[in-house]
Structure formats: C-alpha cells, structure tokens
Image (spheres, rainbow, N blue to C red):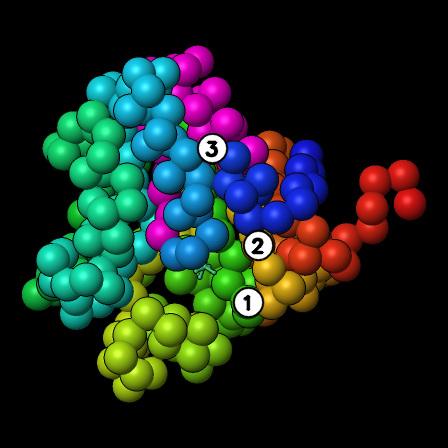
C-alpha cells in the first residue's frame, strides 16, 4: 500500500485528483469507480478545473458509482445521482450514457441490485476505484456486520451512518434508512483502489482499517488484502498511523 500524507484537505484533494487524472491520461477509456460524500469533493473540483483548462477529457471515461440512497429520486438534492451531476458530471465532457448510479427509486430493489451488478461486470473491473471511509469503517454503504457482502445489495444504514449523514438533511429523521450499495466483492475487483480520508473524525477508521485485524466489523479492513491500494489522507486523518521512518 502506498500512503500519501498531505497537510490538509486541499493538498489531499490535489493529490487524489492527480492520481485520477493520471489514470485517465494513461487510459482515456478507463472505468472509474466513483464515490460521493465530502471526502472526494475537492478532488472533483480540481479535475473540473483541469478539464476547463483543456488539460483533461472525460470523453472516453466510463463511470460506475458505489451507491445510492434507497427511496430518493435522481433529482432529489441529497441523492447521489444529483451529487455526481452537480459535483462532477455536469462540468466535464463525460457522456451521460457512460455514467452509472444505482436507481434509488427502483420498484424492486433486489432486481435493481442484480441489474447494477451485471452492469458493473459488463464494464469490467474498475481501473481505479475511489473510496471514502465511513467513521465506522464502512466502504460504499457496506456497514459493519458479521460477513463481507459480496455483490450489490440493499442495506440498512447504521445509526452511526445516519447520524454522520444527517448534516446534509434537514434532520436525522429525513436521512433514508436504506441504500443500494456495491458489495465488498464488487469493490475488491477493482485493479487499483484510491482511498481518501480527511479530518480527525476519520483517524480511528483509518487506523483500524489499515492496522487492525481484517474483520467485517471494520469493512474497510478488507482493503489490506488488495494488491494495489493508495491511501491519501490529511494529517488529522492519518494522525494515528506511524509517520514514515518512525
Ligand atoms: C459515498 C460512500 C460512503 C462515503 C463515506 C465517507 O459514495 O460510499 O462510503 O465515502 O460515508 O463519507 P464522507 O466523505 O462524507 O465523510
């Protein structure tokens, strides 16, 4: 695993954006696994800037997002489809038909999970999978539990996640209770995984995920088994990892 320890959120975002841009430049028709949340927003902003300067094109890129709240329409301002449109897709030249986010309004969630898993399989392994880390160690919406879910599935969100995400909603009561998420198996198929983590409230998750036992109680701990993981974090998120050479 490679670790980049950056001084703050902006530096973390620039580093993460450079890694994503390098992926796109070296393989313009790559498959990018994308994440929502606060952690990748700065990286997306930087990618948009490079695109606007004429340095980066998404014309051949195919993307597949990790997850979506179940019950939210694509145009709901807290849906992950809406997030992706506003924070990246609407500002770059990615083809709309090449973007994939689970359908939060699917009448039959089990069927939607199968469709999405099939779509991910058709696209092939993500060349680069971007991940944020939940404070409880979740990746995608794979919450701590007694096993590692393999494929895309419907999940009940934990209280910790509902509380963490309540900041985006009028109240915790408005946070959807369920989500559709890629499974751990789907995520682990990626050729390369880029984890971004910022802030002191991620220090515990970073520490347990990368130095603790591999357990579904800390879903991100499975990343220790992946052959190509890059962790980009700011000082606060990485504060409990030993400094290089220590
Ligand atoms: C988002 C996702 C989640 C977030 C995680 C961290 O698509 O799958 O796992 O990456 O909850 O969220 P932030 O970055 O908001 O702290």
**Rendered image quadrant of residue 124:** top left
Q: Secondary structure at mark 3?
A: helix
Q: Quadrant of residue 181?
A: bottom left
Residue 166: % across, % down: 36, 76
Residue labelled with disc 3 = 17
At x 67% / y 45%, what residue is drawn? 7
Give how far apart the Cα atoms at labels 1 and 2 are: 11 Å
Report the disc number at residue 198.
Answer: 2
Location of residue 118 (image quadrant): top left
Is the residue marked 2 within 8 Å of ligand 1, measured from its CB? yes
The answer to the question of whether label 3 and label 2 lie on touching residues, with beta carbons closer than 8 A, is no
Which of the two discs, 1 and 2, sits closer to the camera?
2
User: What segment is highlighted magenta in the picture?
Assistant: 15-36
Instruction: State the separation of the CA atoms marked 3 and 1.
Output: 22 Å
10 Å neighbourhood of mark 3: few (<14), some, or many (≥20)? many
**Mark 1 lies within 8 Å of ligand 1 (Cβ measured):** yes
Q: For mark 1, what is the residue?
A: 135
| Rendering coords of residue 93 (x, y %) | 20, 26
The 10 Å Cα crowd at callout 2, few under 14, some 14 to 19, many 20 or more, is many
């Amino acid at each position: 695993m490679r670790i980049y320890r950056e001084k703050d959120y902006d530096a973390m975002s620039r580093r993460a954006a450079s890694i994503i841009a390098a992926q796109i430049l070296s393989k313009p028709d790559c498959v990018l696994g994308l994440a929502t949340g606060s952690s990748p927003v700065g990286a997306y902003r930087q990618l948009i800037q490079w695109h606007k300067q004429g340095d980066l094109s998404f014309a051949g890129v195919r993307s597949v997002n990790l997850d979506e709240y179940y019950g939210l329409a694509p145009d709901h301002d807290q849906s992950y489809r809406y997030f992706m449109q506003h924070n990246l897709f609407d500002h770059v030249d990615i083809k709309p038909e090449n973007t994939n986010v689970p359908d939060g309004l699917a009448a039959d969630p089990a069927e939607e999970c199968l469709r999405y898993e099939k779509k991910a399989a058709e696209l092939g392994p993500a060349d680069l999978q971007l991940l944020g880390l939940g404070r409880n160690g979740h990746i995608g919406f794979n919450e701590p539990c007694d096993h590692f879910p393999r494929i895309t599935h419907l999940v009940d969100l934990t209280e910790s996640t509902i509380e963490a995400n309540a900041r985006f909603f009028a109240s915790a009561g408005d946070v959807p209770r369920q989500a559709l998420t890629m499974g751990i198996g789907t995520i682990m198929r990626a050729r390369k995984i880029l984890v971004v983590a910022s802030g002191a409230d991620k220090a515990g998750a970073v520490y347990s995920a990368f130095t603790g036992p591999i357990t579904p109680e800390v879903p991100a701990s499975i990343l220790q088994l992946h052959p190509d993981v890059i962790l980009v974090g700011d000082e606060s998120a990485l504060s409990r990892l030993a400094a290089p050479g220590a």
